[in-house]
Image (spheres, rainbow, N blue to C red):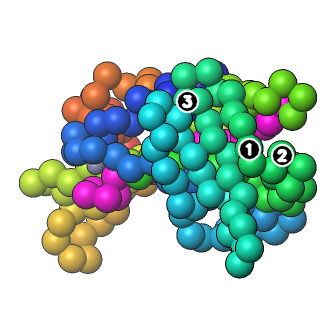
Amino acid sequence: MKLTLKDFILYNSPCFSCGNNTQLEFFLIDRGGPTPLNVALKTNILGSHIEVIVKVTYKSSLSITIDPKHNSWVSNNATMLHQLLSQYGLYVTSDCKICGTYICSNAFTILWSKKLILPLDIEKEFVIIKTDKGTYYLSTYEKDITLLEFTKNKLNSPIFELKIPKLLICDLKDKDALIKKINTYMLFS
Ligand SMILES: [Zn+2]
């Protein structure tokens, strides 16, 4: 996929599962290890631009201000930003606080001389759909694999799970199409 930040925002807005507003959050994740700095970075909407505060020290703060339409950016200290992003990957997520569905981008690749962010891709998806019959899940964490799951609402009920080739929400018309797909797999399993 080749997404501008604006495309990424629209990709899961409103939420694929419950239709509520989703929240955009940015994270830094250490490139050298699996430990994410698990706090969303502070963001400010400046007109049509999004300012992300990537680091705060007691003297100053380091920010990147992105034009979501063109993936262009400016920073108050590009040298420091370059240093920081060689150690940490910058990611964006679209997070639904109501149902728990979230979408995560790949780590931003930045063209430093052109002040551009290369088109984004979807790296992770987690969709949760609660119905009267039970709860349906779609999780894409690995590169080429999606895990589909179903649990009944009663405790200790059986769980259905199946790994299939990568399936993203953009491959599905709507959440009913996903429910139907999982139901069909269950029927023939
Ligand atoms: Zn939702």
Badge 3 local density, few (<14 within 10 Å), some, or many (20+)? Answer: some
Specify the label residue 35 is tagged with. none
Badge 1 local density, few (<14 within 10 Å), some, or many (20+)? Answer: some
Q: Which residue is located at x 22 percent, y 40 percent?
A: 19
**Which residue, as the protein is rendered here, is positioned at the far front?**
59
**Does the residue at mark 1 contact the one at mark 3 (Cβ under 8 Å)?**
no
**Mark 1 — residue?**
75
Compared with 51, 16 (above or below) is: above
Q: Is residue 169 left or right of residue 108?
A: left
Q: Is residue 167 visible?
A: no
In which quadrant will I find the N terminus? top right
**Local SS, label 1:** strand
- Could you tell me the amino acid type at mark 2? Ala
**Mark 3 — residue?**
68
Front label number (2 vs 3): 2
Q: Is residue 112 left or right of residue 170?
A: right
**Mark 2 — residue?**
78
- Could you tell me the amino acid type at mark 1? Ser
- Could you tell me the amino acid type at mark 3? Pro
**Does the residue at mark 1 contact the one at mark 2 (Cβ under 8 Å)?**
yes
Front label number (1 vs 3): 1
Mark 1 Cβ and ligand 1 under 8 Å apart: no
Residue 99, picture quadrant: bottom left
Q: Which residue is located at x 62 percent, y 21 percent?
A: 70
Residue 84 falls inside the magenta stretch = no
Question: CA separation, marks 1 and 2?
Answer: 5 Å
Badge 2 local density, few (<14 within 10 Å), some, or many (20+)? Answer: some
**Local SS, label 2:** helix
